[in-house]
Image: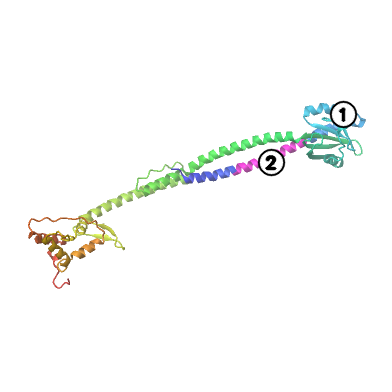
Amino acid sequence: MRSRFVAKLFASFALVVVVGGVLVGLCVDRFTIDGERRGIEESLGSQAVLLSELVAPALRAGDAAGIEALLARLAPASGTRFTVIAPDGRVVAESHEQPSRMKNHGDRPEVIAALREGRGRAERVSDTTRQHTLYVAVAIPGGTPWIGIARASLPLPGLEQRFSRLRAGLFTGVAAGTLLALVVAAFVARRVTRPVVAMTRAAASLAEGAEPPAIDPASSDEMGELARSFNRMAAQLRDRLHLLEAERGKLETVFESMSEGVVAVDENERLLHLNAAARTMLGVAPLAEVGARRRARPSERLAHQLFVHGEPWYNYQGVRRFKERFHPAWEPRYLAYRKPWDLPFALAALAQLVSGGWRAVLPARGEAA
């Protein structure tokens, strides 16, 4: 029998675990991705600062070729795109493109911020690579106020692939943790509800009158104490039932051995119990249906007339009506006699036997018929 209580408890645990796992995954994903993005942005800023220090002497000397050679060595090793920009927005050197083919960068947000505050950042689609790119630019000191801008950038599609791998690993870990938590929740739910399920089955067996199995108190906590209390209650109830059965057996023995007929009915006159003497008396309706057939003998017709008109001597029809209240299953009983004149004597003997004596058959003097 499957326990609905276990299913409900496990469903509650599972809901909490799944919702908690999803929330934890989303929060960790957000903080992890944001932290990774900030780390990449800080790395680009550090590279831009290092680049500004390396190109400052060549930029003062106007050595554009030396700057391009330096960028050509740095870009492949770092995987970063570097750009050196003059204060007027003209591109001095570029690691991935010819400066002469590039537009003026004086209107770029990161360049404007770097010229105004010394540092700037932006995310936008590059006009050169046509890719969504993260830019970090720093001002190169040495002029009034700056002699140029050093910029480091990284295409975001590469970052998104990196973030996707990070996110996949993160969600795999969260899913594995959630699955493990669900297994633990199922184990805990079964362990917690095992005594309750056992007590439910034992109570059902007890209600059906069967011998309930003893419940194993597997723990010493409240559930174990409840199981032990249930075992004591079941033992006491079993002893009391045995005592009641013994007393009932004694009462039934006395009740059945009584010579007087005893009938017990409820307030709606429904039969509750009757002893053997009552069953014997209620099972007989003298002269009922005797001589009612057309081919009945004269003596049987005489008996039928006695049944119909013999109320002053015996309440034949009243007895039949009284016994009909108990809805008996009427069965014919036959009286055998050898000679026709033997029938009245046989009927009189039968009336005396059913009524318990002649005093019950014949009405007392002065009693209304």
Q: Where is residue 122 in the image (x, y as percent from the top left)?
A: 80, 40
Towards the viewer: 264 or 369? 369
* Quarter residue 359 falls in: bottom left
Residue type for callout 1: Ile
Q: Is residue 256 above or below residue 104?
A: below
Task: State the mark number for residue 165.
Answer: none
Q: Decide if residue 156 is on the left or right side of residue 114.
A: left
Q: Is residue 34 magenta?
A: yes
Mark 2 residue crowding within 10 angstroms, few (<14) / some (14–19) / many (20+): few
Residue type for callout 2: Arg
SS state under label 2: helix
Q: Which residue is drawn at 53% across and 41% down?
A: 185
SS state under label 1: helix
Mark 1 residue crowding within 10 angstroms, few (<14) / some (14–19) / many (20+): many
Q: Position of residue 70 (x, y in %)?
A: 85, 27
Q: Is residue 189 above or below residue 347?
A: above
Q: Which residue is drawn at 63% across and 37% down?
A: 171
Q: Is residue 74 visible?
A: yes
Circles 2 and 1: CB atoms closer than 8 Å: no
Q: Position of residue 2 (x, y in %)?
A: 45, 43
Q: Position of residue 167 (x, y in %)?
A: 67, 36
Q: Decide if residue 237 is on the left or right side of residue 49.
A: left
**In the rendered image, which quarter contains the N terminus?**
top left
Q: Decide if residue 65 is on the left or right side of residue 234.
A: right
Provide the major secondary structure of the magenta segment. Answer: helix
Residue corresponding to mark 2? 30
Towards the viewer: 34 or 105? 105
Residue corresponding to mark 1? 67
The colour scheme is rainbow
Please provide the residue range marked out in magenta.
Answer: 19-43
